[in-house]
Amino acid sequence: MTTEAYIYDAIRTPRGRGKAGVPGKPAGSLYEVKPIDLVTNLLDAMQSRNELDTTQIDDMVLATGEPIGEQGQNLAKTALVYSDWNDITTGAQLHRYCAGGLDAVNVAAMKVRSGFETMVIGGGVESMSRLGIGAGGAAVSDPWVSMRSYVISQGVAADLTATLEGFNREDVDRYALMSHQRAAHAQNIGYFQRSLVPVKDMNGVTILAEDESVRADVSIESLEMLQPSFRMFGESGHNELLKFKYPQVETIDHIHTAGNSSGIADGAALVLVGSEASGREQGLQPRARIVACATTGTEPTIMLAGPVPATQKALNIAGLTIDDIDLFELNEAFASVVLRYQKALGIADEKINVNGGAIAMGHPIGATGAMLVSTLLDELERRDLKRGLISLCAGGGIGIATIIERL
Amino acid sequence: MEYIRLEQDADGIVEMILDQPGKAVNTMGAEYAEAMADTVATLEAMVADGDIKGVYVRSGKDTFVGGGDLSSMLDAPKQMSEAEATEKFDGILDAKRSLRRLETLGVPVAVGINGAALGGGYEICLACHHRVILDAPGVQVGLPEAQLGLMPGAGGVVRMVRMFGCQSAIDWISAGRKFKARQGFEKGWVDETADSLEDMHTKAKAWLLANPEARQPWDREGFRIPGGAPGDSAIPKALQGLFHFGPGNVINTTKDNLPAPKAIFACVHDVARVDFDTAEKIEARYFLKLLDSQVSRNMMRTFFFQLNDINKGLSRPADIETTRVAKLGILGAGQMGAGLAFTAANAGIDVVLKDISADNAERGKDWCRKACEKNRRIDQQQAEQLLQRITPTGDYRDLSDCELVIEAVFEDRNIKAQVTQETEVVVKENCVFASNTSALPITELAQASSNPENFIGMHFFSPVEKMPLVEIICGELTSAQTLAKAFDLARQLGKTPIVVNDAPGFFTTRVIGTTISEGATMVMEGVHPALIENAARFNGSPVGPLSAIDEISQETAYKNGEQAKADAEARGETPEQKPAALLVERMVKEFGRRGKVHGGGYYEYPQEGAKYLWPGLKDHFAPEGYCELPFEDVKDRLLFCQCIEAVRAMEEGVVNSAADGNVGSIFGIGFPAHTGGVFQFINAYGVREFVSRAAELTEKYGSRFAPPQLLLDKAEKNQLFV
């Protein structure tokens, strides 16, 4: 017996600038906030906005890209214990690199559609200012493993993508400018307001209410002035290493900068997924259904090519074509990732990342995928469109995609 | 006679003397393992009885211990079954256990190093608490295993990490470093130096008596690995950087062709994280993995056995007494001539450096002076002596008492003929005349000589002071005595001589020519030039075929090609116009791209920044887009052509031993070292498999890949090229 998986609510914190404070340089606003507080802020909001009987939520699956220290040891259940929720709801932590936040939503949907659980939260949290990213792990700190896997910096992989596809600096800067302008416009008019939950302190004082790094004053000239960010990695061996997989490459043109790559950010997001019956019992109005979801793997050195086959896989599962999708949210890990996706699938600028993305607002690794669910759903509602697709590239060459459809 | 005997002195010190019966050098095979196990058992009993103060390990021979028994390693079966692997693994652990028992006897253990302590020999020293070394020529410590594709397997990695930290252990073991006595002391590999054997014994024993509580640092309370370890709660930044960027650097520098640096790097990391006994097991696993690798077999065969055979005179007439040249004549004081003069003088040979004028010759000597200044191993006094041995001249008569004359003049038949004749006027009748040429036929050059039996080719490689190879070419009339003399001179110069017979391109030039030509052919086919260059580098070649031509210059290649064509026509043959020749001709005549020195060839050489491929290659040869070729095919085409040409050369009697071919191809023309050379490449690939792959390449790319009859015969009989 299967049931639809409905989205009843999707909320997120603002994306804070993921910078730790150092003398002379101010920290991002959320640097002082522990990851657990980013989550409990949202748990409180989720409960109060929907007048939830939280005991009816079976489980919370929470993604993180760096599940260590204060962000580790099953932060999901710890947050539930620490919050004003209940003892019954369980929690689990998930790590699928950048795809984690969306995967947590997909897992929630699978749980619901299987009928084994009825209402599940999927989401993600990342405090990059406090924990950074890539401190260690099986892929990068074990020489015997890394000597067989040809792992390169994601930024170099983005430059490689551009080199292989023939994108130049002008192309990626042009896309970046659009992202910045769209995000500034969306923020200005208030398109994100439905989902945004301000981060507040223990006294109820607001710490951050809006996405922090959106800038209206970005120009093509200011983007052009930025130095390439990944040349150092390239020249310390990665440009050579990638030739094991791409021997046709002579040199890498380093074109990605801080201006056309996703920023480092802090934030969290939660999505409430449930069956039709469970929603009805709580008097909730479903906003959309999760039509299909998919993950797939691609060549891991270039790492960023997953979204195209993941999108095709999700479309196949749903029995849809690319033209059936009204809006796309593809995480702006790097400008070349989006350009490659558009080129491969034939998607016009007008349909993708219409309110900007991680280039303008930052990419809190494990949280981003869940954030994009709310961003896409809000925009589908605002435009009164039907279907949207969310996709992200992720470490190890993973691609993920989810199709949602308004009811 | 036993391998190890114990002798107790009046102070209660037991001397443990390694003295393998029937051998000049102590080696570490099964005999050693058994003797060592028995000996430590005896020592343990003596310690339990309480009647010894310390153990002094030394050699009963005039060297220390030479290391592992390579022939048994080479003969071991590949692709072991689980039972075979387990047996080997247990054997490795047994050998390690003896050394562990030695260092934990409960009494101090010192070692006296009186000669080469390399590989396993130094690993014995590492298991002693105190190392005293005799400061004398030929005495050295080192772990050179990596140079043969192996790594230390008797606790060497485990102990080096604990003595020196991860970074130094990786650097030294991966490079296969060896140190002379003084240097070894400075680096901390040994604790004390001694002036004489007596001094060494005295110092070692004095230390034993003064340090009754001695224990290894890693067996003391609170021991920490210097510089930190991967398991530490706070890993130092430098170590994090090492383990983050290091692996990529290993892969990049070896192009993932060498398993030893990889295993060593990972092994250091893994053994640093755990306790000593667990570390010993981990080291054994990596060691066994390397022992079973094809690359270590290739390297042991070529760089140990075959190289030794060659240097001992494999291709030298056996029944002629060894000669030494006291005075050497060199014609031409250009880069090659001057380099030769420097090399010979450095080897203690008097040199007459003759050019067309005394001034020119003097300029050659100036070059030698600068070479001395640049060479850190030559101090001022040595430099003076070296330079004194070089007499620059413009006068042939100064050559009169030279025993051997090498001409290093332009690659021009007429000039070579002229200097040959002019030299013969002044030298003694039995003087050997060697022509240094990379391709001109020796038999033909010898026609200018009135003593063609004294005429021989000696093909030195540039820069001659660094390149280890000499290709000796016998003309039709070259006598055995002449060959022996040329061979002996090469050895005197510290070079490795391979011996080949005269034929166009001899051996090395002929073989390298095929891969350069294959690269050009692929450019003409529209293959992405970066793919060609990367294929060569990923094969393990030092440079790609296109870079190589740029260095030689397209112009020179074109002229050589024209000359070869004229030669062939003169022999009454009709030379076919090969794509490679066509490409060089177009590069030179149509595009004006005549080579690096002329401003650019296949590459552009900007004033600033790195060279990059000339975009014209795409416009002219792949205007519609590059032709898609599997990377494996590109790689194989560049290597197979060389191997097949080598087999043809063997078939024609140009080269007579696989050893000469293997060593010549690696030392002379940069054939990838991990393969063990042109012939060993075929062995390792599998002779039959090689034939079928060659047939495939023939089908797809042309008849030049067709396996020669000799190769087919070998495949038929399932024989290796040895």
Image: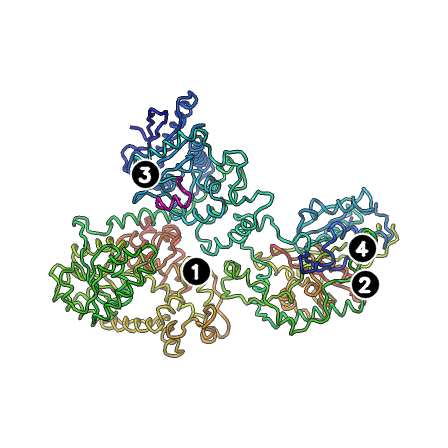
Asked if the residue under mark 3 is in contact with the one under mark 4, i.e. CB atoms within 8 Å, the reply is: no
Q: Mark 2 points at which residue?
A: A193
Labels 1 and 3 within one chain: yes
Badge 4 density bin: few <14, some 14–19, many ≥20, Cα 10 Å: some
Circle 3 SS class? loop
Mark 1 lies on residue: B537
Front residue of this view, candidates B289 and B132: B132
Residue named by callout 3: B114
- Amino acid tagged 4: Lys
Q: Nearer the viewer, mark 1 or mark 2?
A: 2
Along the viewing direction, whichever of B477 and B194 lies nearer the viewer: B194
Chosen colour scheme? rainbow
- Name the residue nearer the viewer: A217 or B152: A217
Chain to which mark 1 belongs = B
Q: What stretch is highlighted in magenta?
A: B179-191
SS label for mark 2? loop
Quarter placement of the N terminus of chain B:
top left
Judge the density around disc 2: few (<14), some (14-19), many (≥20) Cα neighbours within 10 Å. Answer: some
Circles 2 and 4 in contact, beta carbons < 8 Å: no
- Inspect the image, locate mark 1, and give the three-letter code of the amino acid beneath it: Arg
Q: Which mark is residue A182?
A: none
How many angstroms separate mark 2 from mark 4 (CA)?
A: 16 Å
